[in-house]
Image (cartoon, helix red, strand yellow):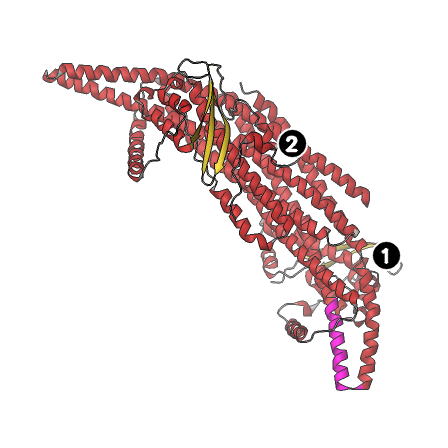
Amino acid sequence: MTYPQPFRSVGAMMQEGLDDGPDFLSEEDRGPRAVNVDLQTDATLQVDISDALSERDKVKFTVHTKSSLPNFKQNEFSVVRQHEEFIWLHDSFVENEEYAGYIIPPAPPRPDFDASREKLQKLGEGEGSMTKEEFTKMKQELEAEYLAIFKKTVAMHEVFLCRVAAHPVLRKDLNFHVFLEYGQDLSVRGKNKKEKLEDFFKNVVKSADGVLVAGVKDVDDFFEHEKTFLLEYHTRVKDASAKSDRMIRSHKNAADDINRIASTLYTLGTQDGTELCKFFLKVSELFEKTRKIEARVAADEDLKLADLLKYYLRESQAAKDLLYRRSRALVDYENANKALDKARAKNRDVLQAETSQQICCNKFDKISESAKQELIDFKTRRVSAFRKNLVELAELELKHAKGNLQLLQSCLGVLKGNT
Amino acid sequence: MNAYMAYKVSTRTSLAMFKSKTFFVRRRFSDFLGLYEKLSVKQSLHGCVIPPPPEKSVVGMTKVKVGMDDPSSVEFVERRRGALERYLQRVVSHPTLLQDPDVREFLEREELPRAVNTQALSGAGFLKMINKASDAVNKMTIKMNESDTWFEDKFQEVESEEQQLRKLHVVVDSLVNHRKELCMNTAVFAKSMAMLGNSEDNTALSRALSQLAEVEDKMEQLHQEKAANDFFVLGELLSDYIRLLGAVRGCFDQRIRVWQRWQEAQSTLQKKREAEAKLLWANKPDKLQQAKDEITEKEKVKDFKSHIIKYLESMLQSEQRVIKFWEAFLPEAKAVA
């Protein structure tokens, strides 16, 4: 069973025969969709993803820019980009020594529809074993799930771009401008096996290094505190993120079961027109509606809680990377000092040693200064993002609980009235 | 092991045939089974749908007898109690069965002789098993030509209803399991959030996160109750009905057996026997007319309705509590600077 046509973006998708009633997707409206991040949008450079297309195994994002900066040829323009090009941009930031002192906005995760596709396939295989109604219902649900995943991946790619655009230094990056403006394909081939292996080793070295560096106590209190805090925070966020995912999955499973109960009751109810069957039909209807609400609750929890945790998992990793770079610079500086002392003692290559020591010192100071500001900003962003999402989560839970309550009350009224 | 669980059966009645207006007796599980046995062999009740008692469970009872104090044995006893109660209520709501002296004795008499032949490992038990097996074989070999379309239709109906109810039961079971899983995962998540709250250095946010952890904890308790609700109210109701439908099929089977005997009588051409069997057969439709009325909708509807209404009412209460929890949390979240 092949998956149907390319899925269009949010705007068009809203009309695609989704559930009746308040669409849970409508929480995410147009405009700066800063889901997990609180950003000040600036008129001089506004970036968003205005459209997206899902084909076979890739997603094409339409990146739309509005800018009054002189660097660009026009004030408003759009290009089409794929996931690999986002990764290329992110990596170019990471590898740029100039940006060592900044928290590099974390790269968006790869669009992953595998799980959804697998489920769709299984549904196709099991088509014979269930009734027509059941099949249509499950198909609708899986399509809604696909939609939700799609929407999420669009949001995450957008957030990445918005963070870059909002950063005072990164927004001026040349690669970024090329990314936004260049009409053609950037032909960034994905990393081949050799490069991936290199990356792997680099990471191994980095983590080993990281452990060594983490052991060194920092002279500066601020950074020492930040280091301890970030290490602990990162671990806890990781844990919370994994557990929230599991919880939400159970919730979805329970909602699926309620769906099956509703269908079976419906079948029972349509056997004949007796009073019992009418009763079954009413209850089946109730369960159907309850299930929709439960599914929305799970989806909202996913959006407001799980995604938030996942995002801050990635950002806290980026912050840790910053601290690591600073520590590395510190170690380099200290080594340069030692080399200078040795050179002075031997009275050989003193000038060279002095220059290199000066460079290291400057690098370290520059990183330290910007790192401090970045970490403070990180904290502010984090607190406000959590606040926003927690408030929205609570409001949504309340809305759904009240809706459910009303549903139950009216149904009970009807059922009791009929006795 | 001589220990056993005794259930208190209390009756309140205005019927003249009972000695007093309110009374109670203590019965053990095998007494209930014994009652069923007695009723099902009575000729006079042939053709009636005799409500089946809950199933035996050696494992469950052994755990309880050994005095294991874990929640699963408490659950087991509660399930059994509920099932026995529903069983008795069905027996007494049947007009013919209520008149039966054995039923009255069950409700009234202080000491009941031990129903020995209900033990699984007794001689009588084995005999029963053998009879059941031979019955099954018989059923397979003889195919009856159904002449009465009413029975044909009803049989189909009963079969398909049983199938649907079985399916429903499976799904409800799955729901119960998933809710239990959700419970576990929510509890684990709540702890994780609490830890996160601890490591967060912004105090207002830290407090908000700890509050969230508490809300999730409360939700976990709610989920647990929901699961119990699903299980006891819905699941057990369905099991009862599935068993009841099994009893209805038993009725059909009886009818087939009687027909078989009639056929046999015909084939041996023993006129006398044939006449006797014909008489028996003539009585059948009468008794089965009774069965027709018993499978009436009214009782079933009322029973189903009341159970489902109970279920929905408890769902209502949980939703109200959910609302309270989140309303309490909202100001905390808003207070984060």
Q: Position of residue A222 (x, y in %)?
A: 37, 18
Q: Chain of mark 1?
A: B
Q: What kind of element bears circle 1? A: loop
Residue bearing mark 1:
B20
Image-based side of B106 in relation to B242, left or right: right
Query: In the image, which residues are magenta?
Result: B251-270
Depth check, front residue: B228 or B242: B242
Q: Amino acid at mark 1?
A: Ser
Q: What kind of element bears circle 2? A: loop
Give the residue displayed 81% in from the left and 71% down from the top.
B284
- Mark 2 or 1: in front is 2
Q: Is residue B256 magenta?
A: yes
Residues indicated by labels 2 and 1 sit on the same polypeptide chain? no
Q: How many marks?
A: 2
Q: Residues within 10 Å of mark 1 (few under 14, many from 20)?
A: few
Q: Main secondary structure of the magenta part?
A: helix
Q: Residues within 10 Å of mark 2 (few under 14, many from 20)?
A: few
Give the residue displayed 74% in from the left and 81% down from the top.
B264
Using the rendered view, name the quadrant where residue B276 is placed.
bottom right
Give the residue displayed 42% in from the left and 30% down from the top.
A314
Using the rendered view, name the quadrant where residue B102 is placed.
bottom right
Residue bearing mark 2:
A22
Q: Chain of mark 2?
A: A
Depth check, front residue: B36 or A58: A58
Q: Position of residue B17 (x, y in %)?
A: 87, 61
Does A387 appear above or below B316?
A: above
